[in-house]
Amino acid sequence: MKVSPLGLSLAVAAASAPLASSEGCYPAHVAGTDYKAGDKVSFNSTNYQCIWGYETVCKETAPTGGISAAWSNAGACSGTASVPPPPPPTAKPTPPLWEKTGCPAAYAAGTEYPDGTTVSHNGIVYKCRGFGSGSNWCGKDGYEPGVDLNWGMAWEQLGSCSGQIAPTASPTVPANAPGCPAQYDPEAEYAPGEMTAIGVMVYECKPAWPLSQYCNVYAPDNEQGGPLGWNKIGGCDGTIAPTASPVHAGTDSGGCNHPYRESDLATYKAGVRVESNGFIFECVSDIHASKYCSQLAYAPGGIYWSMGWKKIGWCDGTLAPTKSPSATPSLAPSASPSAEPSLTPSSSPSLKPSAAPSDAPSLKPSAEPSLKPSAAPSDAPS
């Protein structure tokens, strides 16, 4: 029997098209429902079955009749199908308890979380991954830990938890504890070795560079960055008695040295003093460290100033002008003669002759004739 091409095409098309369902229509699709793999719905008189069980793909994708990775077309339908209730969802296995007791603060959508922050969500502890630069996705939409499709790009699962983390005990303050320095100010600039307090706990900015630079980057109690720049000293009580007035280190005239200027960098050598913000700084004498004085990155008052300068004290006012020169010359000669001769001769001749006679005779004859004739008579008569 010979089959025509038209008949063959119709047969192929009929075989590839979805068959009409004899079961009737499944329950209508409801947008936003958390459908799982195997769930059956109907949409526009067509039955569909969810075939993507990962996270919330079927929940976020509606069966529209076209090609879909979430839904399988089960054919046209009419009437109502008898669909058994879906089996209860399989509970996710609970991960083991994390290393600490109790749950950290609960996750809050839209919160900006620093790198390394731990949160709890639905009984699970997560840690913000971050990228080491303070920028991360932990507070962005679409990265809810354990829920959204890409949550693993922003969070690391640490384990399960229950209850709350017990608050840390208040630090013990000895009876003879010293007074507290000024409370930490995030807007202040802290120098190496400088003390501050948070509550009754004293911290010291690490005295050695480059660690001391972190004092102006992280707060002393920052869990990740604080230990980089701060040493925890201990408890304190009350306030520190006021220190003595700072040393006045102005010049002999009482004023400030010349102000620090970028245009003068090449002149800053060991021992040079400058003024900056009312304080006098002196370039250190060390042959190597003094080279920092001529570099702008180590300017007095900056982050790295202590590498090339030492703070001498405060000053006020300006340098007093030098005295005006005297109207008359001094009577005593200078300690050493000048390199060039004076423009006019002295008013009285010197007592001693010059070291060597001149080669040419003087311009005027002597007042009286000489007693001796010339060495040879002239050829012509007078």
Image: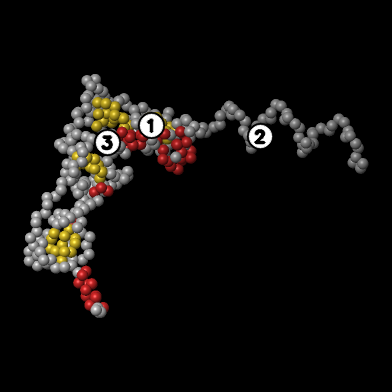
Please provide percent x and percent y for residue 258.
43, 36
Spatial CA span between label 2 and label 3: 85 Å
In the rendered image, which residue does mark 3 sit on? 223
Asked if 89 appears above or below 375 in the picture, the reply is: below
Residue located 18% across and 32% down the image: 167
Q: CA distance from mark 2 to mark 1?
A: 67 Å
Query: How far apart, in angstroms, are the residues tagged by discs 1 and 3?
Result: 21 Å
Q: Residues within 10 Å of mark 3 (few under 14, many from 20)?
A: few
Which of discs 1 and 3 lies nearer the camera? The answer is 3
Q: Residue at x 65, y 32 (%)?
A: 346
Structural crowding at the residue carrying mark 2, measured as other residues with C-alpha within 10 Å and reported as few (<14), some (14–19) or many (≥20) = few
Quarter of image, res 347: top right
Residue highlighted by disc 2: 345
In the foreground, 44 or 268: 44
Q: Are marks 1 and 3 in contact (CB under 8 Å)?
A: no
Q: How is the structure coloured here?
A: secondary structure
Which secondary structure lies at badge 3?
loop
Residue 151: x and y, percent? 24, 49
Q: Which part of the image, by quadrant, shows the C terminus?
A: top right
Element type at marker 1? loop
Residue placed under numbered mark 1 in the picture: 208
Residue 315: quadrant of the picture:
top left
**Residue nearest the viewer, comparing 52 with 24:** 24
Which structural element holds mark 2?
loop
- Which amino acid is tagged 3? Glu
Give how far across and how far down residue 280 sits, in percent.
Answer: 40, 33
Position of 361 relative to 61 (above/below): above
Residue 54: image location, x then y, percent: 21, 53
Amino acid found under the numbered disc labelled 2 = Pro
